[in-house]
Amino acid sequence: MRCTQQFLLQSSTPTGLVLSERKHKEPSRCRQRSSLPFPLVLVSNIFSFFFFFFLAMIWTLVILHVLLLLLGAESSSRGGRTVTFRRTQQDVSRLQGRARTRRDTSSSSGSTRPVHGPSFTSCRTPLTPVEHKVLDDNTHETGFNGDDGSYVILTWVGDGTGVVLVLSTFSAPIDSFTEGGSSRLYRSTDYAKSFHDISHQINKTFIREEFGVSVGPGSSVILTADIPVVNHPGGIIFTSTDAGATFKFTRLPFHLAQPITYHFLNPDYLVGLSIDGGLWLSLDFGAQWRKVHDGVNSFSWGAGVNLFFAYSRTDAVEAEERGDLVLKRTKDLGRTFTVIHEDIYTFGYIGAFLFFSVMEDPRSPRVMYFSSDQGETFSRALLPSASTEQFYSILDGDTDMLFLHVDNPGDTFFGTMYTSDDRGILFSKSLERHLFDGQRKSDFTNITSLRGVYLTNKLDTDGRIRSVVSFNRGGTWRPLNKPENVECEGPVKSCKLHIHGEHSRNIRIVPMLALSEPRAVGLVIAHGTVGDSLSSSQHPDVFVSSDGGYTWRGTLRGPHHYSILDSGGLIVAVEVRRDGQVKTIKFSTDEGQCWKSYNFTVQPFFFAGLASEPGTKAMNVSVWGFRPEADGQPMWVAVTIDFQSLITRECNDGDYEEWLAHATDGGGDPRTSGCLLGLKETYRRLKKQSVCRNGRGFVVSKKQSPCLCTREDYSCDYGFHRHVNTSECVRQQDQANKTLELCLNGEEDELLTSGYRKVPSDGCEGGFGSQLAGQTVIRPCGVKPSPGPPARSSSPVTHFDTPRERLVLILVCAGAGLIVLVAIVSAIFAVRRVVNGYRSPVYRFSNLRIQDEENGVTRDLESAASSNGTAYQPESDEDLIE
């Protein structure tokens, strides 16, 4: 299994694959009170007045120019897993002041702490003396003496090789362009039980923090040096094909602007983007490079050796914001190119879909186009368009369908989620009021341990955040059931479980997101609260589901870091403590029903993160942190615990059971029990009471059989939505008739639909579908399926000769005057606000606000382990492909 993931302490890591088109700005309600002196603020507001005045003039000219053009025309975008642990100056200060007595503020006025939610019993079983000794003998602690690195990067190389590379880097000073920093490189061949310093292999060269380590297919590794751009014609990389045993020095003919990208299958094929927009290609694992294009903004590998990239024909700076990019494709590794579309804002590739956003007309919002055949043909998606104040967000996707979020206008912090057909063209409404907050975070999570299960949060009309789950790929959503061992306290409208997602992690309520793994069938671990809605007034606790999210059980009190080992046969967790120090790890062999605790060190240290090999095959876990050396400076510490020595028995057939997925409601027709997405799936999985090892060779096995189609196997077609009180699909009021015309591949599909379409990848047969009377009539389209750029006028001058044209000119001038007036009034109110003082803004998600020391989670601790294998970049539109 190949994946790459980072999590940084003290800084938030975005998740959710988002192709966002909204400009970066904080909503006005989230802005903080100004701390500037009154004269400076007054000067600032006066400056703002003139700024808006000139901006109004510029917009007037722009509008006039656009109208001139319109009138003139009228007249004629993998390898091992990488984890980063950071130690900040705040951590060092806390470490140096560790002996100070903490003042008890529990009785201080105005100081409130979250309380625990509804109580539940957490099963604890003590270790026997024999178990304790076995673990002691198989716990390995490494202190990186003399290493003053401010952060470490851990990378697992290969699958089952046991090789872990650790790069320790001391952050460079401000004048790093001349001095640089320093790095140390360590290598382990026994799953992080012991390390060897191999810094000499890279001459202790300063390796970049943000994308210094890249691991590809097989045992390939690339380290990217951080060297000054001045007086250096190109960057430096170190490459290895033997899992870091040896490295080769290579000087690049360019400076990298982002990480080197591997081809999915061939590690010799590398793509790099230079800081000046050059697209470079290597076919021999970085030994030689060839520039294939200039002015490139972004790129992405497609299927086979298809390489897509967007470039600017003039100035690449802000070309994305202007929508001036050209999307190209090369099918022969840079020898020839094909233009896919002009005047795009951004593009992305996920699953089997290529997609990009275009403003076809200067007067219109942006629209989305999708292709399922590597850009050979493409069509406009039937979706609401998005203005510059909105965005599209690809939440998840595969070869069958896409989940897409369309933002609501304004700073509403929610939008509508849609699901696509297998062509990525017809989109149906899946969930309204889907949460997408002001920090550009989505709580959408793919529960990978069971097919078709997704979890997310919505913002209800009462302003509260509530969790919902879908078991049929977004066809229907419902609240999570109350945990079996938890009862709500006090009067509540609805007692349900609500899961903390990316929004909660971003504001430090929880340290981790929901966790699931494909090899651990049905297992989900998540932080949550029980009640009427998501709450920060109580500590989040850890809940576990063994059936993919149907039923839950409270298992650990308070926030924890957790990890899944041995394909779900073992779960480990480390509690997040208020003082930040740890010495105990908890583990469970029955999917969290009962836990044992083990003190893995005598001297506690400050916790930095929990790390285990990706793929959940291993039975080793490493706890990372730091403690002071003799001189008081922090020293990195890694403690690796090998549970294989404790759980020695290999599982046999008697340790497994046949488990029918989705058959959790009990009763009903046995012919349809467990039917979901048209199939019955029976898995062979480990019994909870079996204490044995699945082993690295464990393979998930399942048996499938088709079901009779029901209405649940169909989603509402384009122009339809599910009735609130029934499961029927009814026509939206804005759809006048039942005819839907699409232009695909040069032919016009006239779809006469009954309002239903089968969910992509649904395997049902017969039944409900045979009753539908939809049909398709195909005739020539008359227009090309691949739209070109907007029409432009070739006339250099346009005269205002007609009464209509004169009226347009008058309206433009009047609009400009109104803009200037608004700017003046805004400036006056701004100055008055300064004089009278500011009022604190009300944050939209007030029920999720926390104070510095609420819920026991220290603010400088954060890890990111998400089952939603997606991530987004912080720039607009680029986020579409997360």
Image (cartoon, helix red, strand yellow):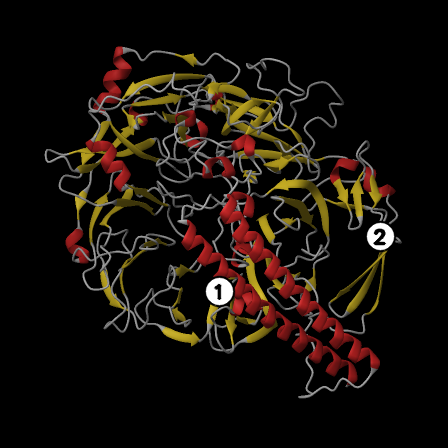
Q: Is residue 123 left or right of residue 126?
A: right
Q: Secondary structure at mark 2?
A: loop
Q: Is residue 818 above or below residue 545?
A: below
Residue drawn at (74%, 39%) of the image: 713
In this rendering, does residue 294 appear at all? Answer: yes
Out of 422 and 108, give the one closest to the viewer: 108
Disc 2 or 1, which lies upstream in sequence? 1
Report the residue marked by disc 2: 735
Give the label on residue 341, or none: none
The residue located at (27%, 45%) in the rendering is: 151
The amino acid type, in three-letter code, at marker 2 is Gln
- Residue in the foreground of this view, choosing between 618 and 823: 823
Would you call the spot at circle 1 few (<14 residues within 10 Å), some (14-19), or many (20 or more)? many
Q: Residue 131 in the image: x percent, y percent?
A: 28, 16
Distance (Cα) linking label 2 and label 1: 38 Å
Q: Is residue 242 left or right of residue 332?
A: left
**Disc number placed over residue 299 in the picture, else none:** 1
> Relative to 785, is 707 above or below?
above
Is any part of residue 648 visible from this angle? no
Task: Classify residue 151 as left or right of residue 586.
Answer: left
| Screen quadrant of the N terminus | top left
Q: In the image, what residue type sits under mark 1? A: Phe
Q: Position of residue 828 (x, y in %)?
A: 57, 55
Q: How many callouts does the rendering have? A: 2
